[in-house]
Structures are given as C-alpha cells and as structure tokens.
Image (tube, grey):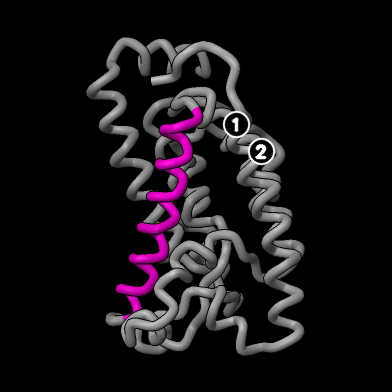
Amino acid sequence: MKKPGKRLNINLIFVLTNVVLFILFTILIYSNSKFLDYIALKPSNIFQGKYLWTFITSMFMHGGFFHLFVNMFSMLFVGNLVEKILGSKRYVWFYLISGLFAGALFVLSALIFPGDLGTYAVGASGALFGLIGMLMLVTPNLPVYMMFIPIPIKLKFAAPIMLILLWLISILGNVPIGNTAHLGGFLVGITYGFYLRKKYKNKTRLISKHFS
C-alpha cells in the first residue's frame, strides 16, 4: 500500500486538470457543437468504432459549472483520503480504471436501453464512485455528510444511499444522470476494496479502526 516519503498531490492535479479541460472543452463546444462528439462519450459512436478516445476525454468534461463543482468538491475530500491510503501510483491507475469501467458499463447498458444510444455521458462521477466504493470496504465506519442530510452517516450506509437517491432523482425528476456509469465505477471500487482487505488484512484493519 502507501510508501512513506514526499510525493506529488495527484488528486489535486486531477482536480485542476478537470477544471482546465472543462474550460477548454466548453470553449471548443460553444465554438462548434460538432466537437461534442470528439469529447463526450456516446454509445452509438462507440458501437460504430468512432471516437474511442472519448472514454478518456469524457472523464474530464462536465455538463456545467454546478456539475463540475459538485464532483471536484467531493474529489478534494474523497480523493485525498484514497491517495493517502493507496499512494500516488496506485491512485492514478485506480482512478482511471474506475472511470474507464464506468464508461464501458454506460455504453453496454445502451444495448438494454436503446434510448441511451444517442445520449452523451460526461463527468468524473464514475471514477469518483470507484473511490467511494473502495472506501466503503476499507473505511466502512467513516462518518460523511450527504446532500440535504445535516448529520453524519457511516460510509457503508451513505454510499449505497447516494446511488439510490441519484437513481430516484433521475427517474422522478427526469434528470439526465449517468446512473449506470456510477454503478460501474462503484463495482470497481468494491472489487478493489475486497482485494485490499484480503491482501493487506492488518493494514486495512488498522485503517478502518482509525477512521471509525
């Protein structure tokens, strides 16, 4: 797991990269809407073998300032903790794999829900839910605050509640939320969390106890 010593704050670099690329991508899209296909993940494009790089670019684009703010604000806290636990190198790979798998599940889900074939997906939420899923297994009793709930809730309860709430908001409010992408990242996080608990039993036990 983590090695002692000086290191770059990779999470902060990810946050700043998201902000800079959001501004750049937004300018490009406003200058020419065709750039959206080059940046956002769209299942119909992927199934045609087009714009495969959007699995990556879509992770660093957001659907507006509020979307960006919520994700980056969450990443500043969640990401920093995950990076401290894993170390910088593992954090980079874990973050990217979570985001890629989230995008892949979003694309594959369009085979079940054909109406999503022409839907665009953007945002760091898939990767973020990967981080949350891992923490749910490694620091299950970590107290966290959720939107509209003024009291702290243990992460092992808060994480699934967040997924369900977002799903309900998207259905009842007809809000375009990438629920399958969130689920994809979350599954990666849970899988990695189980791996860490099995491989580093003593370390994860101490970490869990520290954040209880």
Secondary structure category for the residue under label 2: helix
Q: Which kind of residue does numbered mark 1 sit on?
A: Asn
Q: What residue is shown at x 41% (from left), y 42% (from top)?
A: 93
Which of the pair 164/180 is nearer the observer? Answer: 180
Q: Is residue 57 left or right of residue 183?
A: right
Say whether marks 1 and 2 touch (CB < 8 Å): yes
Return the x and y of residue 144 as percentages of the image width and height: 60, 34
In the rendered view of the protein, which quadrant contains the N terminus?
Answer: top left
Region in magenta: 88-110
Mark carried by residue 192: none
Q: Please tell me which of labels 1 and 2 falls first in the chain.
A: 2
- Return the residue at label 1: 80
Q: Which kind of residue does numbered mark 2 sit on?
A: Leu
Q: Is residue 122 left or right of residue 147?
A: left
Return the x and y of residue 59 as percentages of the image width and height: 53, 60
Q: Residues within 10 Å of mark 1 (few under 14, many from 20)?
A: some
Which of the pair 183/124 is nearer the observer? Answer: 124
Q: What residue is shown at x 57% (from left), y 62% (from top)?
A: 123
Secondary structure category for the residue under label 1: helix
Residue 108 painted magenta: yes
Tell me the distance, in whole angstroms, between the alpha carbons under discs 1 and 2: 8 Å
- Return the residue at label 2: 12
